[in-house]
Image (spheres, rainbow, N blue to C red):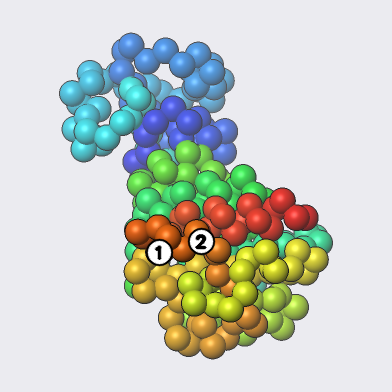
Amino acid sequence: MIKVYGTNTVYEALLNNRVSKIYLNKSYSDQKTLALLNKKNIAITYLDRKELDEMTNKQNHQGIVALVKEINPLDLSSLIKKVESVQFPILIILDGLKDPHNLGAIIRSADIFDVSGIIIKKRDSVSINDTVEKVSTGAINYVPICEVNNLTKAIEELKKHDYWIVGLEGEAKYTIETIPTDRKLVVIIGSEGEGISRLVKEHCDYLLKIPMAGHGHINSLNASNAAAIVLYEIFRRK
């Protein structure tokens, strides 16, 4: 079980039958969530704000906290099979991402822009936790997450299933306006500060960059910003 909080996050967990226990402030008043709690017949424990603050390390819980079943990541073969019916699926590979806020935000963008799944490493990478759940605002219930031991082997397997592998690289020659939208795609986003690792980069079919103004003081985007931009670019041209 993990702890999640905030109205939207808890509501989506309720819709997906993941909630085992609810803690509410007596002043909690979101009628949609209260009605769903009543429908699901879930027992409620009432706590004062100080107790809820202690449960969430003073995060913005909005008066509601839940214990929920953890998301069980898929293996790669299950993910590939799950998206077989999608004509041109988009998958994201996160190479060495460490920040749970970035992962949560990427999951949220993935849901908005119709991504079929996100692939992360089992080790030396961010994992699903309460921060990821909170930042995704419930999107984690709808975007399949896949864990693999080795990213390069995963890429090789995806190529066997006719996926084109596109890596985001700040020094790439071409920009994301050239990204194809009429084929199965894997978009690889590197870690904060380090980008895509050498071996993973060597397995990309091609590298693309996000065009920038060129006269700004900061010349890079964090992983979640980069993901949102490239996913929108694909979405707007489909």
Residue in the picture at 40% in, 58% down? 216
Residue 22 occupies which quadrant of the picture? top left
| Numbered badge on residue 75 | none
Q: How many marks?
A: 2
Is the C-beta separation of discs 2 and 1 under 8 Å? yes
Kind of residue at badge 2: Met
Specify whether 137 is left or right of 15: left
| Coordinates of residue 101 in the picture (x, y in percent) | 37, 51
For disc 1, the marked residue is 219
Which label's residue is closer to the chain start, 2 or 1? 2
Which is more toward the observer, 226 or 26? 226
Circle 2 sits on which residue?
A: 212
Residue at the spot 53% in from the left edge and 35% down from the top edge: 12
Q: Where 29 falls versus 83 (above or below)?
A: above
The residue carrying pointer 1 sits among few (fewer than 14), some (14 to 19) or many (20 or more) residues within 10 Å by Cα, namely few
Q: Is residue 32 visible?
A: yes
Q: Position of residue 197 (x, y in %)?
A: 43, 81
Q: Residues within 10 Å of mark 2 (few under 14, many from 20)?
A: few
Please, what is the three-letter code of the amino acid marked with disc 1? Asn
Q: Is residue 142 above or below residue 159?
A: above
* Residue at figure coordinates x 71%, y 83% from the top left: 160
Q: CA distance from mark 2 to mark 1?
A: 8 Å
User: In what element is the residue under mark 1?
Assistant: loop
| Side of 65 relative to 80 (left or right) | left
Q: Report x, y in % for residue 140.
A: 52, 47
